[in-house]
Image (tube, helix red, strand yellow):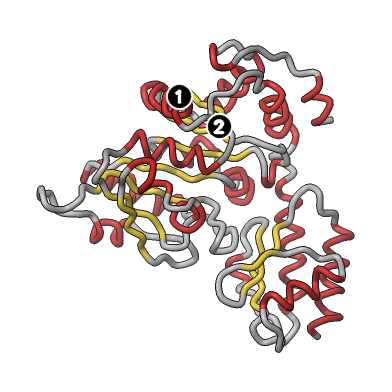
Amino acid sequence: EMRRAISEAEVGDDVFGEDPTANLLQEKVADLLGKERALFVPSGVMGNQLCIKVHTEPGDEVILEYDSHIFNYEITAPSIISGVQLHPLPGRRGIITADEIKRAVRPLAYYVPRTSLVCIENTHNRAGGTIFPLEEIRRIRNLADEVGFKMHLDGARLWNASVATGIPLREYCRYFDSVSVCFSKGLGAPVGSAIAGGAELIEQAHRFRKILGGGMRQIGILAAAALYAIDHNIARLKEDHAKARYLAEGVSHLKTLKVDMETVQSNIVLIDVGETGHPTDRALSMLQERGVLLTPEKGTNVRAVTHLDVSSAQIEQSVEVFRALFK
């Protein structure tokens, strides 16, 4: 059905703002997130970096969590593209508090960088798909208003956080000056993300998108997939969460494996294979030989992600493979 939507997409030249499917997607995302405007971008990394660029000036400092995607997986792009310094704070399951941020904010002096932006990730990938508490977000927003920094939400999996908690997307987004969301990953589109915020912010981001090579032509074929994903694949994310819980519970009973069940809040499961007697890469190879594909994570953890292309039967098979290999 998604491929049919792609093939039937009405397209135009988005560089001139003439792609009707892209325009519809951007209007829909802005409305969903409660923002004035939205902008399609090829990837989540570009979305995050555009927002950092708009919110900062060279020589500024950006506070974020130590295990965040922006700090670990975006190849120092903030320093290359925006000329800013990152100030990572150690979090607990990906969460940093307003009090911790307050202590990290730089004093107003010409010889230190200006704290201009705080970035939060929800759900938090490297912490195992954990959900950032809304009450703490509110406290950070109050601090932002008091001190004067902006807030950006790396919401690549914000859909998962909303489905897991029942908190509307708009409620999460209202506390942020900018938001990025992904249509790939759990929503199942092949390509694409979006950023959302005020009209002036998106106007500036549109210009920087062109500078970074993100101005494309008939992107309606990509926007159509994203529209289909939004219309059909958000509510079903609860199925992925149930599958992740089943997998986590199934392997947590094995003495050689460790799973922090408190981190299993959405569609990611971190499994510690350190006591299996095998190096992490060997454990991954053993699983792959049996048809179970995972990725390495920090330390001796491996990462499993459930999504719409993994059936319940395959999750059950995966649990059996873990039991056979590591019982």
Disc with the residue nearer the chain's start (1 vs 2): 2
Quarter-of-image position of residue 203: top left
Q: On the rendered image, what quadrant is the N terminus found in? A: top right
Secondary structure beneath disc 1?
Answer: helix
Q: Residue at x 50, y 35 (%)?
A: 170
Secondary structure beneath disc 2?
Answer: strand
Q: Residue at x 45, y 23 (%)?
A: 36
Q: Is residue 306 left or right of residue 298?
A: right
Q: What label does residue 178 carry, if any?
A: none
- Kind of residue sitting beneath label 1: His
Q: What label does residue 41 carry, if any?
A: 2
Quarter-of-image position of residue 181: top right
Query: Residue 135's spot in the image, x, y percent?
Result: 41, 52
User: Marks 1/2: CA distance?
Assistant: 9 Å
Q: Is residue 97 left or right of residue 258?
A: left
Query: Residue 172's spot in the image, x, y percent?
Result: 48, 42
201 is higher (above) or lower (below) than 63: above
96 is higher (above) or lower (below) than 41: below
Residue tagged by mark 1? Answer: 206
Q: On the rendered image, what quadrant is the C terminus found in? A: bottom right
The residue nearer to you, when weighing 139 against 182, is: 182
